[in-house]
Amino acid sequence: MTPDEYCREIESYLTRKNDGHLIRIVGPSFERVRSWAEQGVPLKVAYAGIDRRFEKYYAKGPRRRPMHIDHCEPDVLEAFDAWRRAVGVTAGLSIPSPVESKPKGRDNLATTLERAVARLTTLRGGPTPPIPSDVLAAVVAELDPLVAAARTTRGPAREALTTRLADVDRRLMDAARAHVDATVLAELQVQAAADLEPFAERMPAAAWRQAIASAVDRALRARLGLPALAEI
């Protein structure tokens, strides 16, 4: 995809988000979006950043005017920063986060974990759970008592808790990979390679393979609606 095509895709997506109101991406706005393409921001990551900006806009009350793409850039770059760190694409890049991150407090950890448990419980009770319900039940049973602990742990105990969450997350994703159809994994593999292609020359072979695996897991998690326990 050329930078021009990339900009047109972003323009079309922004039009749909603006309920059909077309705001052309030209001039400085075009250069801004083209820089996203040159940095290697995948379209789906840019879309996620745009969605995040619209969610903030909706939260302020009724919309008064269409959203311009320039207003979306901080959220797009923040989404890109989170994506590249999650899949392991950091070498050779220097992209400052547009929003200063704050350390997660103990209550925030507990609240986020509580939401993850609620999400897994909802998936288990649905008509077609994305992975076997017994796996979901086992994960919920393991996580549920950790909610209260997350409100009081600190120091080494907190580190041990996050390590345990990462282990549970690995088991959850192993179950997801084993459960989905092989064609789904192949499709996600192809998409991950396409998304990461701009960074291929800057990554050692081992890092490339790990980035692909992480990107596939991230996409599979999103498709199945599973919470990211390792990122809590």
Image: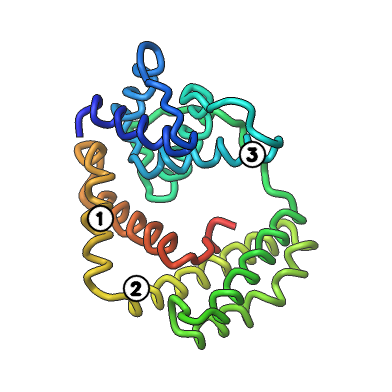
Q: Which residue is mark 2?
A: 177
Residue at 37% from the left image edge and 44% from the top image edge: 44
**In which quadrant is the C terminus drawn?**
bottom right
Question: Which numbered mark, 2 or 3, is in the foreground of this view?
Answer: 3
Q: Which residue is mark 1?
A: 209
Q: Amino acid at mark 1?
A: Arg
Distance Cα–Cα, label 2 vs label 1: 16 Å
Determine the secondary structure under disc 3: helix
Q: Is residue 12 above or below residue 124?
A: above
Q: Is residue 138 above or below residue 193?
A: below
Q: Which residue is mark 3?
A: 58
Q: Are marks 2 and 3 in contact (CB under 8 Å)?
A: no
Question: Which numbered mark, 2 or 1, is in the foreground of this view?
Answer: 2
> Where does residue 24 sit, x and y in percent of width and height?
38, 21
Residue at 49% from the left image edge and 34% from the top image edge: 18
Residue at 35% from the left image edge and 15% from the top image edge: 26
> Where does residue 180 sit, x and y in percent of width and height?
33, 75
**Which sits in the foreground, 24 or 71?**
24
Question: Which numbered mark, 3 or 1, is in the foreground of this view?
Answer: 3
Distance Cα–Cα, label 2 vs label 3: 35 Å
Q: Earlier in the sequence, mark 2 or mark 1?
A: 2
Determine the secondary structure under disc 2: helix
**Which sits in the foreground, 31 or 101?**
31
Residue at 70% from the left image edge and 35% from the top image edge: 60
Q: Is residue 94 above or below residue 200?
A: above
Q: Earlier in the sequence, mark 2 or mark 3?
A: 3
Distance Cα–Cα, label 3 vs label 1: 39 Å
Q: Is residue 221 above or below residue 7?
A: below
